[in-house]
Image: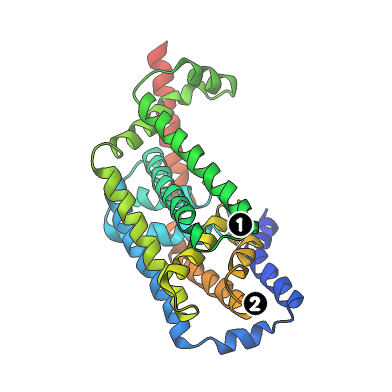
Amino acid sequence: MQFKYVFTALLPILVVVVYSIIFKINIIEIVRSLTPIIILAFVLSYLGQILVIALRDKKIVGVSFYTAFKARLLGNSIGLILPGWVGQELTRATVYSKEHVELIQGFSLSLLEAYYDVTVGSLMFLVLLPIRFIAIELIYIFITIGNIIGWSLGLAYVYTTAGKSIRIEKSIVKLIGLDKYYFVLNKGKQAMKDKIEGKNFITYFSLTVLGYLVQSLSFLAMVSDYFKDILINMTFFAATLFPIPGASGVSEIAFSLFLPPHFVVAAVVLELLDYFIGFIFIRDIDINELKKEFYKIKKYGEFYQGSES
């Protein structure tokens, strides 16, 4: 298992090396040629986006701004190793638990955060696509449309069924042997519904857009056309929707649509640098504390089962 984590952590680097060999690029020289302005542009714009998104996450979860900031940074870093909810969403929920947010509530609200991350980013990519459309981008179009539909249907289902006893849900969880945890499922759905009612939707949507616009500033150091920079950033975002550690391979393709090979390598290296920043908070994940939170969930399930008998 440890080898698996080491391999997935190294995979993005290995892909960069392969890309450099194919295009005969000296990675060491590329790294050496990075000016302080380019490095600062990437790091500061990334941290700027995190600050904006942390403000949104703070409102969604009800934790301090600093906790939301740490959770977002660390979640992005863990996502390099464990793509999907096991990485980012569960990591953020674990950090939120430090402020006495129950794990199931924190995880559910982390999924709500992911809904805005994915759907807003996908919409921005599709809206900006006419600026410069290339046939190979069809694969990104399919994955973004699929994510918009999937996440939106999922959120609509949560909103309409929260607080209700759904027979088919109970049948499914019983079929997989988790019927005593049905109470936990309802608790998570209700937590999400409570945060998407009223004007909150517009606020969360707007902050997510602003976050991506801030992050796009990093590419101004390479391409002095801000609208094109936004498209580059959102195409890279579309690549991250593939369940591959560090979007290895697809991110290089995304950047290659707009940047020459040496800038592709530089951009991937700098993006990895950004995502690795969150590991400074790695000690915030305590396995023992995580076990305690799961034990609480187990107790909820047992209590629900007892109330049914």
Outermost residue to the top: 309
Q: CA distance from mark 2 to mark 1?
A: 18 Å
* Disc 1 residue crowd, few under 14, some 14–19, many 20+, Cα 10 Å: some
- Front in this rendered view, residue 209 or 307: 209
Circle 1: element type:
helix
Q: Position of residue 18 (x, y in %)?
A: 73, 71
Q: Is residue 62 visible?
A: no
Residue that appears at 40% across and 21% down:
304
Q: Is residue 11 visible?
A: yes
Circle 2: element type:
helix
Q: What residue type is disc 1 on? A: Glu
Q: Quadrant of the C terminus?
A: top left
Residue that appears at 56% across and 60% down:
133
- Front in this rendered view, residue 126 or 59: 126
Q: Quadrant of residue 48?
A: bottom left
Q: What residue type is disc 2 on? A: Pro
Residue that appears at 33% across and 50% down:
205
For mark 1, what is the residue?
137
- Sequence-wise, the earlier of marks 2 and 1 is 1
Considering only vertical position in the picture, is 233 above or below 205? below
Q: Position of residue 238 (x, y in %)?
A: 54, 56
Q: Position of residue 236 (x, y in %)?
A: 54, 62
Judge left or right: residue 27 versus residue 282. Answer: right
Q: Which mark is residue 201?
A: none
For mark 2, what is the residue?
261
* Disc 2 residue crowd, few under 14, some 14–19, many 20+, Cα 10 Å: some
